[in-house]
Image: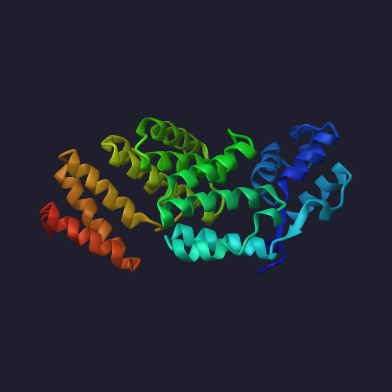
Amino acid sequence: MNGAEKMRILGARVRAYRKARGLSQKDLAKNICTQATISLIEKRNKIPSMQILLKLCSRLGIQLNDVIVETDDQAVQIFREVGYAVRTAQYRNAESRLDRVKLRSLKENDEIKAYYYYRGQLQLMNHDNPDEAIFNFGMLLNEFNNRSKDIYSLMSRLGLGLAYAKKGEFDKAELFVNQAVRDLDEFDSDSPDLVQDQVSSYLQAAKFFQEIGKDGRTLSLAKKAIKLSEQNNSLFLLEDIYQTMALSQLKLDDGKNAQQNMYIAYALALVSKNQRLAESITNNVAKYQIPPLAL
């Protein structure tokens, strides 16, 4: 791991210093970088080149260590591990790691958001407790800007929708899921972890619409997830996405595409060694009497 990978920029601090000096993003960027670079720093904690960063600090009249921290502290490492475990459906493992984090010890907004999001998600997945999930997702959205479009806020809105669905409040659920999907469509993933979070969110939304009988929306969202995966050379969750598509196509009497996508899902499950999903696909092939693909 090189030095840049061990550093994290505190975008909220950069924004606070900029505003304290009466500078717009355009003013701060002038003759140093683009305004978009400043936006990525402030909103997404995206670290620019060291040359750009030093010039920005000079213009703001601050030291580098005023906005840069080391990322190998314990909380950051734990959240990385929790995120990976959640994305790969290792929910018990994720919860045991998250339990090592004390909320009151967290100082950075992104860490607090991560804590509330993962706690809410694990209440849904491990404990089937939508009320506790709603509490945690709501804490994130209420404590910070409710219309923020960072990944944790976006996934918390989706989580609220899924929690209300578990309570049988489908009108309220659909409102939150639709809001999350609109934000997903505008979200620009710039790291492998964010790509996986975005793909996973599209899949969760697709399954929600499948549950309420809106299979056209399911297919649309599944295709967006596939396109995002292709753009980023990622196989993450593709086997699940293709099976979800096939099940909706069966309900829409599109047997030909359902057959093709179900067998694509099976092949991907074998490649990814996802035995659980391979068994699910095998059961669905038998249940719906899907014939083998012609050679």
- In terms of depth relative to the viewer, which is nearer, 247 or 55? 247
Height in image: 9 above or below 148? below
Count all numbered tags in the image, as a single digit: 0
Q: Position of residue 56 (x, y in %)?
A: 81, 45
Q: Position of residue 43 (x, y in %)?
A: 66, 42
- In terms of depth relative to the viewer, which is nearer, 65 or 141? 141
Q: Is residue 293 visible?
A: no
The quadrant in which residue 68 appears is bottom right
The quadrant in which residue 104 appears is bottom right
User: Residue drawn 59% across and 53% down?
Assistant: 115
User: Residue drawn 77% across and 49% down?
Assistant: 52
Q: Position of residue 288 (x, y in %)?
A: 13, 51
Question: From the image, which quarter does the N terminus lie in?
Answer: bottom right
Residue 154 appears left or right of 130: right
Q: Is residue 264 visible?
A: yes
Q: Position of residue 284 (x, y in %)?
A: 18, 55
Residue 275 appears left or right of 137: left
